Amino acid sequence: MIEYLIIQLDNTSTSYCHYGIERKERKLIPIDILKAGIKFGMMENLMIQFIYPDYSLPEGYAEVIESIDHSKIVSSQCEDKALEAEADVIVFHDWTDLSKSELDQKKCYVLRTTKTDLFDRYLFLKETLSKVLRLNVVITDVETFTEQDFERYKQILHALSEHVEKLYVESKSPQLNILTDRMMLEKMNNCGAGDSNITLAPNGKFYVCPAFYYENEENCIGDLKHGLDIKNPQLYKLNFAPICRHCDAYQCKRCIWLNRKITLEVNTPSHEQCVVAHLERNTSRELLENIRKHGMFMPDIEIKEIDYLDPFDKREEW
Amino acid sequence: MTEEEKNEIQQLFERRNGLNELAKILTPNNDALYQKLVKDMGETGTKFQNWWDRMAAKYQWEADENGHWEINFDTCEIFLVTE
Amino acid sequence: MMLSVTANYYHHYPKHYFMTVYKIKENKGVWQEGAYKNITFIVTKDCQLACKYCYLVGKNVKERMTWETAKAFIDYVLGHEDEFREESVVWDFIGGEPFLEIELIDKICDYLKLRMFELNHHWFNSYRFSFSTNGINYHTPAVQHFIQKNREHLSIGITIDGTQKKHDLNRVWKQATPDENGIIHPSDRGSYNDVVKNIPLWLSQFPDAGTKVTISSADIPYITESVLHLYSLGIHQMNINVVFEDVWQEGDDKRFEDQLMQLADAIIDNGWYHDYACSFFSENIGKPLDPNRDNQNWCGAGRMLSVDAAGNLYPCTRFAAYSLRSKKALIIGNIHDGINQNLLRPFLSLDRTTQSPQKCLDCEVASGCAWCQGENYDAAQTDTIYQRSTAICLMHKAHVRANNYYWNKLYRKLELEGLREEFEKNKKTTNPVIC
């Protein structure tokens, strides 16, 4: 069931996920489309998330946006610093920016990073975790992971896990998506594009997510005039994902766009995505065990020991 | 016979067929490969005959000087077929 | 399965063998129980015919595989033995009409045999060369020479659709010259006479050979007479399928059902079930399927591998451009870079429930209802293999009704003849848990 409406305010609105921003030219959402989108969200009872560009919006837009309860997703490079202060989620696109920014312990942050940068600079995350409410690390080139990369990532997760354990022992509760989410989850909590959320682009059309808009404007799933028209909607649901529905790496992003890009099917993840998710899952399992050595913690959560990193390899057993 | 015994002879049968058909296209011009083929044909033939000898002794199959045995690979049954 | 009571079969047994044996004439079991890798060479897109139901919509004379492409492909496959762990292999050759490229095929097969032997490849002990041909060139010296050379490893099916009337309805020669747009159209000349003359030779060389009969809308009135005609030609094994494409007209299901009932009557009343097999009638068709236990994908797309003249690799020939009406080709790799395993994941993960609409999951006669991932993809609303095409739904239901009639009638006959119990004891049992 669709619960969220993501409204891209501009063609250059920040990315908060795996996709890169393909458009360099600004194209602001016309104010009448913005109003119609908000109205659509209200009538469909959807929670609205606005994704902002880096430039300040013209007069009149703020008023329209504030007419509805919403969340703001803003880049750390946004020139409107007042907006950054109001943002619910701030997105960093590089580590230098992260290291120089003043962080707010009450805010959620997204760090979009390549694997190389993560491997080189992960230690900085230890310092970051104490300064934020939540940090989402998005590896933007996860599909390029090699066997060596998996091994390196495993080491990094382990190193971070030791630090997170220390923080928990100090009665802090850092949230790091790639490590702590799995400890809290009892079921899948994924991207949800096309299933629990859809995107309204500046052209007034709906898309599965912004990445699909950037890939091809013709791949819309409806528009404001005619409503939603999602073809094969079941394929965005977990029940119709043959690998994922058997999986318990609940924290996995299950990025629909990446699925489509790498395997040509929205319901099938790549090998790399599955292994990365299971490395995270397994480290979460260890972290949970280690925290429990210090006292009771999340007693209802169980993460079983498994002997595989890609559930695809176990498909014969289903 | 057992499934395993059937698998053994079936593999030898297939290999023998493969070697025989290879012999139609491989000439002594390709010396190393030809030698390998000749050797393999000999070895496979020996294994093939050994299998029949072993099974006949094990199962005490009825024989007839005007007949031959045939195997049904689907059912693992063996038949004495007389002329 | 069909029952045969052949009196003189008993006399071949040793004296201590008391039990009367009931020979069941069923469609010949699949080689190696289907546990083989099927690798297809699309050697040409040319064909002498322009069959009206042919799913190969983009046939042409230009795309012929070169020896260099074939060799590169073979070297890739045989050089990656760890990626191809199946115990057996079927090297399959299609077109267009494959025997138009018999010289290339001969060279390919010789190379395959040599290399499998040279590399000590496990497939040398278990391989076949397979062909589905229109039969027109079957008798030619080049084809016959090839057959003699590879006799023990061949599986050749000649497509003959039934009576001359039925066969020539669709299987026609193409016109000699294309139109102004370069499109080659069907002619009015059927190919039956050119094919049927080769049937005796074919059956003498492959007595257990079967034919594949394809049923489209226009063929329905001729099903019974065609099957019986093929029996009369000496063909004992028949695999008959309706096309997956959405070609059906209103009332086709009823007409199909009527034809199958007539066929059932003919087979049972004349006792032809003893010696002739027809895939229309199977005890396993028309049962409900459990969503968990009976969830397997029976379509081999993704487990097979096809290569075309350009060296592109496909999960099945049906995903090549010339097989598709409305979608782009789905290429999973090429002979230089190999197979992109991520592109195979959807194929190898696909099961019954993730592709089927609710009506299929609720269907009380679902077993035996087939799908084709290629047709799924071609007909789907989006670029996906996960939207099952259900164009054959009514045809399947009609098939089930006729199949039920057949078995009820046959069982009753066996009961009245006192043969039912022996039939049940001796029939091949299938594993109820389909793996």
Image (cartoon, coloured by chain):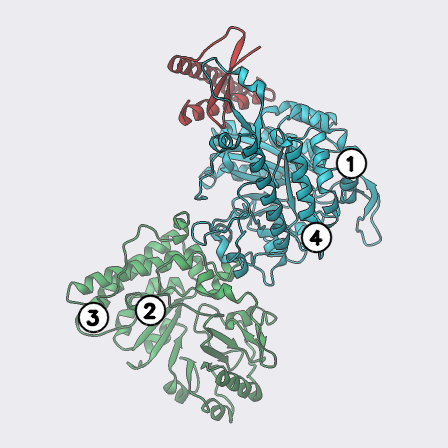
Chain colours: A green, B red, C cyan
Q: Specify whether C33 is left or right of C147.
A: left
Judging from the image, mark 2 belongs to the subunit labelled A
Name the quadrant containing residue B7.
top left
Say which residue label 1 marks: C192
| Residue under the point 46% across and 65% down | A237
- Tell us which disc is closer to us: 3 or 1: 1
- At 69% from the left and 28% from the top, the residue drawn is C234
Residue flagged by tag 2: what amino acid is it?
Asn
Q: Nearer the viewer, mark 1 or mark 2?
A: 1
Query: Where does label 4 land, which residue?
Result: C252
Can residue C356 be seen?
Answer: yes
Within 10 Å of disc 4 (Cα), the crowding (few <14, some 14-19, many 20+) is some
CA gap, disc 3 and disc 2: 15 Å
Chain letter behind tag 4 = C
> From where the camera sits, is residue B29 visible?
no
- Compute the Cα span from label 3 to label 4: 70 Å
**Cα distance in 3D space between marks 4 and 2:** 57 Å
Say which mark, if any, is on residue A168. 3
In this view, the mark in front (3 or 4)? 4
Pick out the residue farthest to the left.
A294
Q: Which amino acid does label 4 sit on?
A: Asp
Tag shown at residue A177: 2
